[in-house]
Amino acid sequence: MPKTEITATEIQPKAAAEQISPMAVLAPVATWVLPGAGHFLQKKWTRGFLLLFAVALMFVFGIAMGGRIYKANGGDLLDMLGFVGDAGTGGLYVASRIMDLGIVNFPHATADFGTKFIVIAGLLNVMSAVDAFHIAMGRKQ
């Protein structure tokens, strides 16, 4: 059996690194600041409005149910994870901290559900920022 050698010209070069466009940076940041904004910038109107509606409504319902908004602190691990989830709402989180919303003075049954709504709204917004990035990179329509 003859031995075949592979020359350097026969080896296919690996795919070059993708170029990151300015929109690929701007869209996720805009989405973090205002849910759906990165999709609006890319003219994905329906998706942008659905994400804005879903994230904002979950956040408002969470506040209305007496949910807690976590502060950045080095305390309990669950508080730190809650802060990461809350901070994912971006502009909504900043506005709520400025207006002193989400300060629970007395616990009640719906407050825990409200807290979870706020955290999940933040995580959904992070997922939508990743989606806006993938659209900007051309990996998704």
Image (tube, rainbow, N blue to C red):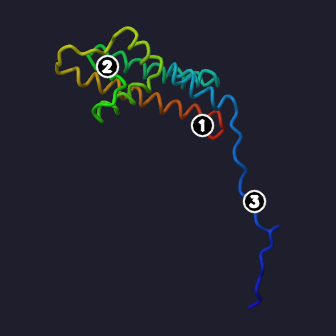
Q: Are there few (<14), some (14-19), or many (20+) residues within 10 Å of tag 3?
A: few
Label 2, secondary structure: give it: helix
x 39%, y 18%: residue: 57
Kindly identify the residue that appears in the image at 39 percent across and 30 percent down.
84
Secondary structure under badge 3?
loop
Whole-number angstrom distance, CA of label 3 to CA of label 2:
51 Å
**Kind of residue at disc 3:** Pro
Q: Is residue 61 above or below residue 23?
A: above
Left or right of residue 111: residue 22: right
The amino acid on which the numbered mark 2 sits, given as a three-letter code, is Gly
Which quadrant of the rendered structure holds the C terminus?
Answer: top right
Q: Residue furthest right?
A: 9
Where is 2 relative to 100, above or below?
below
Rendered location of residue 40, percent (x, y): 60, 21
Mark 1, Cα crowd under 10 Å, few <14 / some 14-19 / many 20+, is some
Q: Residue at x 43, y 12 (%)?
A: 95
- Does residue 52 appear to the left or right of 57 in the view shown? right
Amino acid at pointer 1? His
Residue at image mark 2: 62
Mark number displayed over residue 13: 3
Quadrant of residue 69 within the rendered picture: top left
User: Which residue shows up at 66% across the image and 38% down it?
Assistant: 138
Between discs 1 and 3, the one toward the N terminus:
3
Provide residue 99's location: percent of width, then percent of height.
Answer: 38, 8
Pick whichever, 73 or 10, lies toward us.
Answer: 73
Judge depth for marks 1 and 3 and give the one in front. 3
* Image quarter of residue 73: top left
